[in-house]
Amino acid sequence: MRDIRVALWGLGAMGSGIAKMIASKEGLALSGVCVRRDHLVGQEVYAYLGIDRGDRDPVFITNKIEDIVRRDLCDIVVLATDSFVETQFDKIMFCLERGVHVLSIAEEMAWPWAQNEELADKIDALAKMRGVSVLGTGINPGFVLDYLILALSGTCEHVESISAARVNDLAPFGKSVMVEQGVGISIDEFKRRMEEGSLSGHVGFPESMSMIAEGMGVALADIEETRDPIISNVDRKSAHGEAKKGNLAGIRQQSYGRLANGKVFIHLDHPQQICPEDEGVNTGDYVTIRADGYDMNLSIVPETPGGIGTIAMAVNMIPHVIGAKPGLRSMLDLPVPRCILGNYAEQIHQERDHRYRRGELVSVETVILPVGERAPQVPDDTKRTPLRAFTKGFLQEESATRGDLVTVRTMSDRLVTGTVSDLPISPTHTFGHSVPELTAVHRQVFELMFGGESK
Ligand SMILES: NC(=O)c1ccc[n+]([C@@H]2O[C@H](COP(=O)([O-])OP(=O)(O)OC[C@H]3O[C@@H](n4cnc5c(N)ncnc54)[C@H](OP(=O)(O)O)[C@@H]3O)[C@@H](O)[C@H]2O)c1
C-alpha cells in the first residue's frame, strides 16, 4: 500500500509539530512544505527541524505552493497558516482546484457554516465536484469544547444544560495565537482594540456552539460572548510570547448559548494565558452535563495539551479525510478520532474509485454558472448551488478517476472538458412505487367513462 503523501502549508509552531509527527509515522510521507519566510526557502525540512531523515526522500522548503500542490504529487494538504474561513478560502479553493483533499486547523473551519455559510457552500460545491474532502479540526474548536461534549452526551437520555471550561496554557502556540490573544499588551490597548474590534481573542466559540447545537438538534436563539483581560501579576515569558507584570497574559472568554425561552443551554468558559503556572493557576478541561436528575462530570487535569493535541488531531484525522465522502465535512461526519499506532494508509476506509480507461463511456460535470453568478431571482438554496451540466462521452485521456479534469467525445462528436463525475452512466430513476389510492382512482375513472369496461 502506498504511503499517504501530505503537503504542508505553513511551518509555524503547529506546522513544525505536524511535520515532525508525520515523519515519525508509518504510512505517511511528507511530500512538500510551503512557507512565507524567505530565509527558509531551499532548506531541507528534516535538517531544518533537526530530525533524522532516515531513508525518506529529502523535502526542500518552497514558497511556491503551485510547486507542491498537484494531484500527482500529494494526496492531502494540511493547512496550518491562519484562523479564519475568509483568509483560508482562496487557499482551500486552490487545493480543491487541483483535486487534493484539505485538512485545516483554522479554528473557524471546525464549523465553517457558523459565520461563513456562503463561503462554506462554495467550498463544499467545489470539493464535491472534484471528488475530494475538506475538514477543519484541532484541539479547540474541534475537540475539547465541542466534540468531547457531544460524545459524552451520547450516554444521556436527556440533557437539561451543559457547562464546560478549558483553563489552558497558550505557551505552546505560535506568533499568530499570541497576536490574536493580545498576549503582552496593556489594559489600555486591550480596551482600544476591543472597541475597534481588532482583538480576535479565542476564535471558535460560535463554531463550537453551533457544532454542539446542530449535533444535538437544539435551536439556539442567541449566542452571547464576553471577554475579560487576564492581567499578569508577574513577568511571564514563553517561546513566542511575553507579558510584563501589569499587562495581559491572555483573555478569559465566555460564551452563553440561550434557548428561545432565555434559558442558558450551553455555557463555555475559556481563560487562556501564557504560563498560568507562574501564578499558581492549574490548567484543566472540565465538562458538566446536567442530565435528567443527575450531573455527569468529566475533568482532565492538567488540560489536554493544546499544542500536541492540535498536532495529533490533525495528523490522526488524515486517513479519515481521505476516506470521507467528497465535500466539506465536519468532525461529526468522520470516524472517531484516535491515535493511530499502525500504518496510517491502512486506516483509510473508502470504496475504491473506479478507474476509467481511454475510450470508456464516462459522465463529466461542467459548471455553467458558479455560486455567486446565479440569477438574482432564484431561491436562496438554488443560489447556493452551481448550475451544472452532465455530459456523457468517451474518455480521451489514457485513464482517469472521479474528480479528474478530462475531455470526452460525445456521441454527436463534440469534445467536452469537465471533471469525471460519479453520476451513473445508466439511468437509475423509476416511475416510483405503486400508489394504492391511484389504483382505486383508475378503476373509478373506467367505471365512469366506460361503465366498468377496461379498454
Ligand atoms: N483549531 C485549533 O484547535 C487550533 C490550535 C492551534 C492553532 N490553531 C490555529 O492554527 C494556526 C497556526 O497556528 P501556529 O501556532 O502554528 O501559528 P504560527 O506559529 O504563527 O504559524 C503560522 C505559520 O503560517 C505561515 N503562513 C501564514 N500564511 C502563509 C502563507 N500564505 N503561505 C505560507 N505560510 C504562511 C506563517 O509564516 P511566517 O512565519 O512566514 O509569517 C507562520 O509560520 C493559527 O491561526 C492558530 O490560531 C488552531
Image (tube, grey):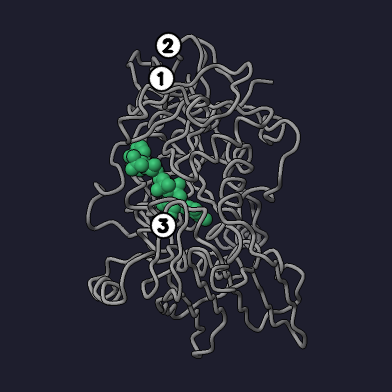
Local SS, label 3: loop
Image-based side of 381 in relation to 111, left or right: left
Q: What amino acid is found at the position of numbered circle 3 in the picture?
A: Gly
Q: Nearer the viewer, residue 402 or 210?
A: 210
Splitting the image into 4 quarters, where does residue 184 fall? bottom left
Splitting the image into 4 quarters, where does residue 154 fall? bottom right
Residue 349 showing in the rendered view = yes
Confirm or deny contact between disc 1 and disc 3 (CB under 8 A). no
Local SS, label 1: strand
Image-based side of 411 in relation to 344, left or right: left
Q: Earlier in the sequence, mark 1 or mark 2?
A: 2
Q: Label 1, on which residue?
A: 406
Q: CA distance from mark 1 to mark 3?
A: 50 Å
Confirm or deny contact between disc 1 and disc 2 (CB under 8 A). yes
Question: x, y percentage for residue 330?
Answer: 55, 53
Question: x, y percentage for residue 223?
Answer: 44, 77
Q: Nearer the viewer, mark 3 or mark 2?
A: 3
Q: What amino acid is found at the position of numbered circle 2 in the picture?
A: Gln
**169 lies above or below 35:** below
Label drawn at residue 396: 2
Q: CA distance from mark 1 to mark 2?
A: 7 Å
Local SS, label 2: loop
